[in-house]
């Protein structure tokens, strides 16, 4: 990455976790990374390693236990809510109560940081919504209620809401959960296109490690006691994927960059 380009997101010595009545629970290892404009970055790791907790911490939904998060050169905690909404959009695994909202109405919620006090959409807002519907091939769903959509269609609309928010950083937690292999690949390629065509930084968690290796610019590999971050090819050479899971059932094939089942 060109040293003259400033990182969108800079994380230093970050420890994420949460507090319980029995004490503080730390998840994963200490994390250091920098993300730049136009990058598609996946967070991968076994179940329970803290992928969702990390993304919620990065998005300001929960506080970090230690370390620092800088978004566009400013400490995350220094952002007023409106300013944060103009710099970071997030799609979590929890389904929002979309109900009878149509695709265009749900996408329009992404314009909320920019509307006036009564929430009126300007001509610029409406143009942005139209552009998102076009870019994500959602024009045919414009007036369809969310409860009538398939999981894949609704996921595209949720991504559309984040895209309409027009932030330099988009954070998504498990955007391909509950989708078949075709639609998982479709969402991966869609996120890659968004990052590369709009110079936005897209950070997301996933269990689809094989797809992440093929399509992402960088990958953060989380394990209980440490993390590795870098380009997929470098992580393969480093052996970062080989120790993620017990080798009695699956093993990582460095030659193909995929996991193989031990028969």
Image (spheres, rainbow, N blue to C red):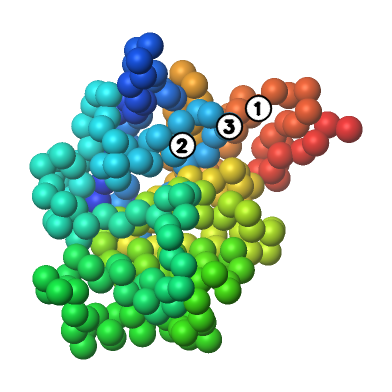
Q: Residue furthest front?
A: 100
Looking at the image, which is closer to me, 238 or 53? 53
Please give left or right for residue 260 compared with residue 124 in the image. Answer: right
Is residue 146 in view from this perspective? Answer: yes
Task: Locate residue 116, reporting x and y percent.
Answer: 12, 74
Per the image, label 3 sits on a secondary structure element best described as: loop
Q: Earlier in the sequence, mark 3 or mark 1?
A: 3
Task: Locate residue 188, reporting x and y percent.
Answer: 54, 60
**Label 1 packing within 10 angstroms: few (<14), some (14-19), many (20+):** some
- Cα separation, mark 3 vs mark 1, equals 7 Å
Mark 1 sits on what residue?
245
* Tag nearer the camera, 3 or 1: 3
Mark 3 sits on what residue?
46
Task: Locate residue 79, reporting x and y percent.
Answer: 13, 47
Residue at 25 percent of width and 71 percent of height: 111
Marking on residue 51: 2
Task: Locate residue 207, reporting x and y percent.
Answer: 59, 43
Please give left or right for residue 215 compared with residue 83 in the image. Answer: right
**Label 3 packing within 10 angstroms: few (<14), some (14-19), many (20+):** some
- Cα separation, mark 1 vs mark 2, equals 16 Å
Looking at the image, which is closer to me, 261 or 15? 15
* Marks 3 and 1 in Cβ contact (< 8 Å): yes
Residue 138 to residue 165: above or below: below
Q: Earlier in the sequence, mark 3 or mark 2?
A: 3
**Label 2 packing within 10 angstroms: few (<14), some (14-19), many (20+):** many
């Amino acid at each position: 990455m060109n040293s003259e380009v400033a990182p969108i997101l800079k994380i230093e010595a970050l420890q994420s976790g949460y507090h319980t009545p029995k004490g503080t629970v730390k998840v994963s290892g200490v994390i250091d990374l920098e993300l730049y404009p136009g990058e598609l970055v996946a967070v991968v790791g076994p179940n329970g390693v803290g992928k969702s907790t990390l993304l919620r911490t990065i998005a300001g939904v929960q506080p970090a236990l230690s370390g620092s998060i800088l978004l566009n050169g400013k400490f995350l905690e220094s952002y007023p809510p409106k300013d944060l909404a103009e710099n970071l959009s997030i799609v979590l695994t929890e389904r929002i109560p979309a109900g009878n909202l149509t695709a265009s109405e749900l996408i329009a919620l992404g314009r909320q940081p920019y509307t006036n006090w009564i929430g009126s959409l300007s001509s610029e807002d409406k143009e942005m919504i139209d552009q998102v519907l076009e870019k994500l091939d959602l024009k045919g769903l414009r007036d369809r209620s969310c409860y009538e959509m398939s999981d894949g269609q609704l996921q595209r609309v949720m991504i559309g809401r984040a895209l309409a928010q027009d932030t330099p950083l988009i954070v998504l937690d498990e955007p391909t959960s509950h989708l078949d292999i075709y639609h998982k690949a479709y969402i991966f390629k869609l996120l890659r296109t968004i990052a590369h065509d709009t110079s936005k930084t897209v950070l997301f968690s996933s269990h689809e490690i094989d797809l992440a290796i093929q399509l992402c610019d960088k990958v953060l590999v989380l394990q209980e006691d440490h993390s590795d971050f870098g380009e997929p090819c470098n992580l393969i050479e480093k052996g970062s994927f080989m120790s993620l899971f017990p080798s009695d059932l699956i093993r990582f094939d460095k030659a193909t960059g995929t996991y193989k089942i031990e028969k």
